[in-house]
Image (cartoon, rainbow, N blue to C red):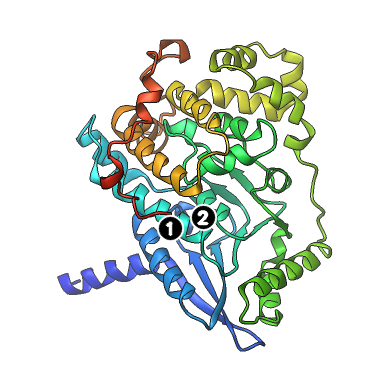
Amino acid sequence: MSGANLNAAVINAAAEQVLFSTLATDSGKRVGVATLNIEKALNALNLNMVQLLTAQLTAWRDDDNIVAVVLDGAGEKAFCAGGDVRAIYQASVTTQGEVTEAATEFFKQEYELDYLLHRFGKPVAVWGDGIVMGGGLGLMIGASHRIVTECSRIAMPEVTIGLYPDVGGSYFLNRMPGKSGQFLGMTAYNMSGADALYVGIGNHYLNHDDRAAFFDALVGVNWCDSQAGNHQALHDVLDKMRNQCSVPVAVSVIEQNQGLIDELMAGSLDEIMSQVSSLDEQITTTHPWLAKAIKTLLAGSPISLSLVHLQSGLGEDLSLADCFKLELGLSVNCCAKADFAEGVRALLIDKDRNPQWRFADIASIPQGYAQELLQSPWDDKNHPLKAMG
């Protein structure tokens, strides 16, 4: 293959990482459809995909003939299993201790895309079937219509790679019932569709087999020129379809055990670690979901656990834009100074699943270390997200 043909093939392959189409409707309006299209990688987001999505979503937002947008993922296994962080890892190990352009640009553009979805105006539906993790959850939580199914498996697993629940986690985790947001961040617990509905990540439920019926229903919606009217029309269609689901919503494990979760996650970080470490064997035996969650917590990065605890103390005072600005500084600092590179090495590069964390446990972390990671590398005037909000 010639150099020109090879370059063209690479460009085409990159462009096909997200497929864009529009759906004609009976009302004469159109619905934009964006499909994440790297099925072998469980549709994990890379910077190219973020840029493609941002450009097309911006165009659809400004197109009066586009009344709504749907995001979904190729294949049966996942909407989006997170972010493809290998490029950030390579930059981090090459220039250890330094904030890299690769990390700054990836997180900056990812958070700008998430913020665009939160502020889109027109209805945005996400087909959250299968695996939805990390960066995929960032896309989903920004949508107005967040569809989960009996096959949804949703998590924020950053504690396993030395990061923390970003993509707006500082905003939405603190708005969940009780201490459930902190529990999800510390344990990487895999939520079911029922759990996601309970904590507010999902707001509509359909069955895995209803995807084609959902797209058929979009054709018949009485779309109009009112964004508020279109939001309500889509809500009404999804509510009607839910009533016809053959597989009912299961009971949420988190809802059933909210009291237990609140007890385990109460107090200082030292107290939490003591509480989870001394759980009665009878409880973990009768609650296998909890045993798995606690095992993940205890194996996670101590720095990440301390960051999730700090994050949970932010409350609901910060705006969404302020949360993204805080997270950008924290994320690049984690890549430069914390456990991110080692976590990615162990899980995704060498795959030995044996990370050697910077500190052996919570008690070994120097006082004030986690707070220092919260300090932004930039002042307000030079912050990469200064225009946000």
**Secondary structure category for the residue under label 2:** helix
**Image location (x, y in percent) of residue 206:** 73, 60
Q: Residue furthest left?
A: 3
Amino acid residing under circle 2: Leu
Q: Residue at x 80, y 42 (%)?
A: 251
Residue 139, label in figure: 2
Q: In front: 229, or 198?
A: 229
Viewport quadrant of the C terminus: bottom left
**Image location (x, y in percent) of residue 277:** 61, 13
Viewport quadrant of the N terminus: bottom left
Amino acid residing under circle 1: Leu
Labels 2 & 1 near each other (Cβ < 8 A): yes
In the image, residue 300 sits, relative to residue 197, either above or below, namely: above
The answer to whether residue 198 is left or right of residue 247 is left
Q: Residue at x 39, y 48 (%)?
A: 84
The answer to whether residue 285 is left or right of residue 368 is right
Residue 113, label in figure: 1
* First in residue order: circle 2 vs circle 1: 1
The answer to whether residue 37 is left or right of residue 47 is right
Label 2 crowding class (10 Å Cα cut-off): few <14, some 14-19, many 20+?
many
In the image, residue 324 sits, relative to residue 2, either above or below, namely: above
Q: In front: 350, or 278?
A: 278
Is residue 146 at least partly visible in the picture? yes
